[in-house]
Image (cartoon, rainbow, N blue to C red):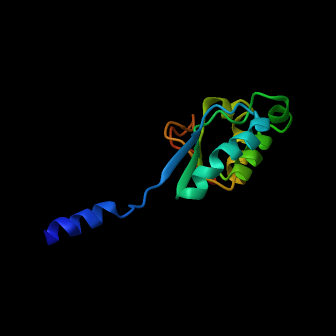
Amino acid sequence: MLLAAALALSLSAASPCVEILSLSDLHGRVDALPRIAAEIAPVRARAPSLLLDAGDSAQGTVEASLSAGDAAVAGLAALGVDAAALGNHDLDFGQDAARRRIAAAPYPTLAANLRDARTRRMPDWRNL
């Protein structure tokens, strides 16, 4: 009986968990970020969470194109993104622009299949 009570008590205690929130294919639509912020705010307020961007954020709108993707990075930073993946369209402005954006972002950028064409190794970019 005592064991059953202890087991019931341990099962009823709230266990810590992290909620995972993800974004994908923003394609420069920084105008959507305020709505997204409002949607995710209750989730982020109630429990620990990670906000991850799955990539393809840097291009697709006039704002993103005129800033070579910087507008998207600034918007994701303001949203509180914890990490982002590098999508194929995040390289549309070239490797130098991607390298600069990745280095400037306040969150890490993740990539598993990015290789330097000359060395065949993962590029040694800051924040990648």
Q: Nearer the viewer, residue 19 or 124?
A: 19
Q: Determine the image quadrant of residue 91.
A: top right
Query: Along the horizontal axis of the image, is 6 left or right of 84?
Result: left
The answer to whether residue 65 is seen in the rendering is yes
Residue 50: x %, y % from top left: 54, 52
Q: Residue at 47% across / 54% down in the picture? A: 18
Q: Say if residue 128 shows up in the picture.
A: no
Q: Is residue 69 left or right of residue 123?
A: right
Residue at 75 percent of width and 46 percent of height: 75
Query: Can you say whether 62 is above or below 22 in the image?
Result: above
Task: Tell which residue pokes out farthest to the bottom in this image.
Answer: 2
Which residue lies most toward the front here?
Answer: 1
Q: Is residue 7 above or below residue 113?
A: below
Q: Position of residue 111 (x, y in %)?
A: 54, 42
- Give the quadrant of residue 62: top right
Determine the image quadrant of residue 93: top right
Q: Say which of 128 and 39 sits in front.
A: 39
* Residue 120 shown left or right of residue 35 in the figure: left
Position of 64 relative to 81 (above/below): above
Outermost residue, left side: 1
Residue 119 placement (x, y as % from top left): 53, 40
The number of numbered discs placed on residues in the rendered structure image is: 0
Residue at 77% from the left image edge and 38% from the top image edge: 30
Q: Quadrant of the N terminus?
A: bottom left
Counting from the top left corner in percent of width and height, residue 15 is at: 38, 61
